[in-house]
Image: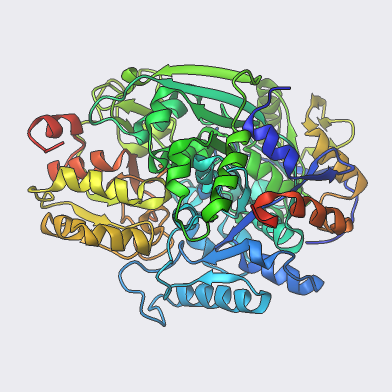
């Protein structure tokens, strides 16, 4: 999942609606599953505690099996910076997230994995969630460049934050190579800092 | 042109503008721990990359380490494996590590400032959202994910966009029994858990001016709970006094030159902010959370609001219009990067001295670092806690996130000095967390239920 200069223009697939605001990364990936030295297999533990206490949790619902577009509400991914949360989502097959808003660290962690997060207003997200609940087979088309998500007759304005959008479209969402490209300049900036060069 | 500290530091660390419009930002200090780094080191190996600035990279173990015994190999095999992996990675890549056997081991956000690694005007990154803590001395510090840990290891840089800056003034005096924790819980309650999205929080005002660096760390630590990725306080004489003599701080004339540079970084008096709020310290009371995010709080004398979230109430077993005060607790936890420093333990010890933990309560104190533990023991605090019925543990994150064996069981209710009351946060999926100051945790441990620490102070705890 690292290093591929793949351009991401468009995601297409069935959806999975997950209602609720402030869905924190402890709920997405409980801390006991951070007791690992690799990200492999994390998808098995997505929302594990919520799924155990709620049999009707969307991630338990066979109607949404194989979905690639997750649809969430406000402040999704708040809390811990654990990349294990978006890693688990990406490894479960999620290719895009549409939501009202995202925590900033989660947004950065998702984008660097090539997982675009689309922001739309409350009413639009609710309509999309309701549509998927009513017709789980509906195919969602998410266009990164246009900032448009369509599903059946629904058409939403849902934008990817500009810097991440440009990075997805140019295939530069994984920035390490860019950060290493001008290393002389990195050294120059470092040497100009008194706490690096010595007070 | 007048500028904020945030912008001065940002500009000084800007390498270039990337094609996406993001800034390539140099990271002055990279702190690493055992949980969010192993995959990053693996990615380095896959690509054949080295660590670009090993001398600006420091590691410790905190999240998973046992706090009952640090004898190796750990009984917890996964703790042993993750610690061993970090030891191997640091050896291979030439990184300075304070592992479980080092006298400097501790929570990464406690040891950074304690060792003087954390300094004003630095950019700091760590694979942990509470990295904002380091802003207390006037650094700009970001929590990052593991792929970004890889980026910083490989290039000492991050691809980021500048944040807006919200100035938060807290003016006046805090009443007795009201602490920095109450201030930040109140700020988060008022501005919301996502109110800080897109912002760095610059804290100031006469109440902050009077605070110690420990107290400022408590406030900056929880910036992320309000959605702000970074939080800071402008460096002042308190900051310089704090740093002087610390192991990694400049010495002699260099310290004076550093102070001159640090002073120049503070926000200019007429700097423009993207937003400003002003709070009255006197309006802040001892605060406790009732819900499942850190914004869901009330003062200890207040009732749970009429518009309280249904899901949170159902999980916590609370009702609208009732008080949190009087809620029976099962566990009392004093520790974490929020409130695990010496002054936190001193304040809690002041409350428990001469009292005993209620019989049904399991109470533990987990110092934020081995140095905190040593300093506390030199003052006899461990004896005060033990005599009162607390367990006195070794340094680590412990029950803040339940990654080691320190966990809630079932639906236990925990009075906790930590930072998150999320569902399942303390290791039991149905465990319930009430966030509060260390003094309030001490009061709850003694009373066996959530209590108003001010009443204990008035009842004769020596000030």
In the image, B117: left or right of B394?
right
- Residue B166 vs residue A14, the one in the foreground: B166
Q: Residue at x 80, y 57 (%)?
A: A187
Could you tell me which residue is drawn at 40 percent across and 42 percent down? B421
Quarter-of-image position of residue A143:
top right
Looking at the rendered image, the quarter that the N terminus of chain A falls into is: bottom right
| Closer-to-camera residue (B159/A68) | B159
For the point 17% across and 55% down, the residue is B385
Q: Position of residue B62 (x, y in %)?
A: 45, 63
* Above/below status of B93 relative to B413: below
Point out residue B444 in the picture as x, y percentages from the top left corner: 20, 41
Residue most toward the front?
B253
Please state if B452 lies on the left or on the right of A191 as rendered: left
- Could one spot residue A97 in this view of the protein? no
Colouring: rainbow
- Identified at 92% across, 46% down, the residue is A170
**Residue B39 position in % (x across, y down):** 66, 67
Residue B31, above or below B269: below
- From what the image shows, is residue B128 above or below residue A3? above
Along the viewing direction, whichever of B91 and A141 lies nearer the viewer: B91
Q: Quadrant of residue B321?
A: top left
Q: Is residue B59 visible?
A: yes
Residue B76 x/y as whole percent: 41, 75
User: How many marks can you see?
Assistant: 0
Q: Is residue B341 left or right of residue A15?
A: left
Vertical position of residue B267 compared to residue B442: above or below: above
């Amino acid at each position: 999942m690292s290093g591929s200069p793949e351009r991401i223009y468009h995601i297409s697939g069935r959806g999975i609606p997950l209602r609720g605001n402030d869905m924190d990364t402890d709920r997405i990936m409980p801390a006991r599953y951070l007791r690992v030295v690799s990200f492999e297999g994390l998808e098995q533990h997505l929302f594990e505690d919520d799924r155990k206490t709620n049999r009707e949790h969307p991630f338990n619902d066979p109607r949404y099996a194989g979905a690639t577009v997750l649809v969430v509400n406000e402040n999704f991914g708040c809390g811990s910076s654990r990349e294990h949360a978006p890693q688990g989502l990406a490894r479960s097959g999620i290719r895009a997230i549409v939501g009202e808003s995202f925590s900033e660290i989660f947004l950065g962690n998702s984008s660097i994995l090539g997982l675009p997060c689309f922001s739309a207003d409350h009413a639009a997200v609710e309509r999309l969630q309701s549509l998927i609940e009513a017709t789980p087979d509906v195919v969602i088309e998410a266009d990164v460049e246009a900032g448009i998500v369509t599903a059946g007759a629904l058409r939403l304005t849902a934008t990817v934050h500009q810097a991440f959008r440009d990075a997805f479209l140019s295939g530069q969402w994984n920035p390490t190579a860019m950060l290493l490209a001008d290393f002389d300049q990195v050294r120059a900036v470092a040497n100009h800092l008194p706490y690096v060069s010595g007070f | 042109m007048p500028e904020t500290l945030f912008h001065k530091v940002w500009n000084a660390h800007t390498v270039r503008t990337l094609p996406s419009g993001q800034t390539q930002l140099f990271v002055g200090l990279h702190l690493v721990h055992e949980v969010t780094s192993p995959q990053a080191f693996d990615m380095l190996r896959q690509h054949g990359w080295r660590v670009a600035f090993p001398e600006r990279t420091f590691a410790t173990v905190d999240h998973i380490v046992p706090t009952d015994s640090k004898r190796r190999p750990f009984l917890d095999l996964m703790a042993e494996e993750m610690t061993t992996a970090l030891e191997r990675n640091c050896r291979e890549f030439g990184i300075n590590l304070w592992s479980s056997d080092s006298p400097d081991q501790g929570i990464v956000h406690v040891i950074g400032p304690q060792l003087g690694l954390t300094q004003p005007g630095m950019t700091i990154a760590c694979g942990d959202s509470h990295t904002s803590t380091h802003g207390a001395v006037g650094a700009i510090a970001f929590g990052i994910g593991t792929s970004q840990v890889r980026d910083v290891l490989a290039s000492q840089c991050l691809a980021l966009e500048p944040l807006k800056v919200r100035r938060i003034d807290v003016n006046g005096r805090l009443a007795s029994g009201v602490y920095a924790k109450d201030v930040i819980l109140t700020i988060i309650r008022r501005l919301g858990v996502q109110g800080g999205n897109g912002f760095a929080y610059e804290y100031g005002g006469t109440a902050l001016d009077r605070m110690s660096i420990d107290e400022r760390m408590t406030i900056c630590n929880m910036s992320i709970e309000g959605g702000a990725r970074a939080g800071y306080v402008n460096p002042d004489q308190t900051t310089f006094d704090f740093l002087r003599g610390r192991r990694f701080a400049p010495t002699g004339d260099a310290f004076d030159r550093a102070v001159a540079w640090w002073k120049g970084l503070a926000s200019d008096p007429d700097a423009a902010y993207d937003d400003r709020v002003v709070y009255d310290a006197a309006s802040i009371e001892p605060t406790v959370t009732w819900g499942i995010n850190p914004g869901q709080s009330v003062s200890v004398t207040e009732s749970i609001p009429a518009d309280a979230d249904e899901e949170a109430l159902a999980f916590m077993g609370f009702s609208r219009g009732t008080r949190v005060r009087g809620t029976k607790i099962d566990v009392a936890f004093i520790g974490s990067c929020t409130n695990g420093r010496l002054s936190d333990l001193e304040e809690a010890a002041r409350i428990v001295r001469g009292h005993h933990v209620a019989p049904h309560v399991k109470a533990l104190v987990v110092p934020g670092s081995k140095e905190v533990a040593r300093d506390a023991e030199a003052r006899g605090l461990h004896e005060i806690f033990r005599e009162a019925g607390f367990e006195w543990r070794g340094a680590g994150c412990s029950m803040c996130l339940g990654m080691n064996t320190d966990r809630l069981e079932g639906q236990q209710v925990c009075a906790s000095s930590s930072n998150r009351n999320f569902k399942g946060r303390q290791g039991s999926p149905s465990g319930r967390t009430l966030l509060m100051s260390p003094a309030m945790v001490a009061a709850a441990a003694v009373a066996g239920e959530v209590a108003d620490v001010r009443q204990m102070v008035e009842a004769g705890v020596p000030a």
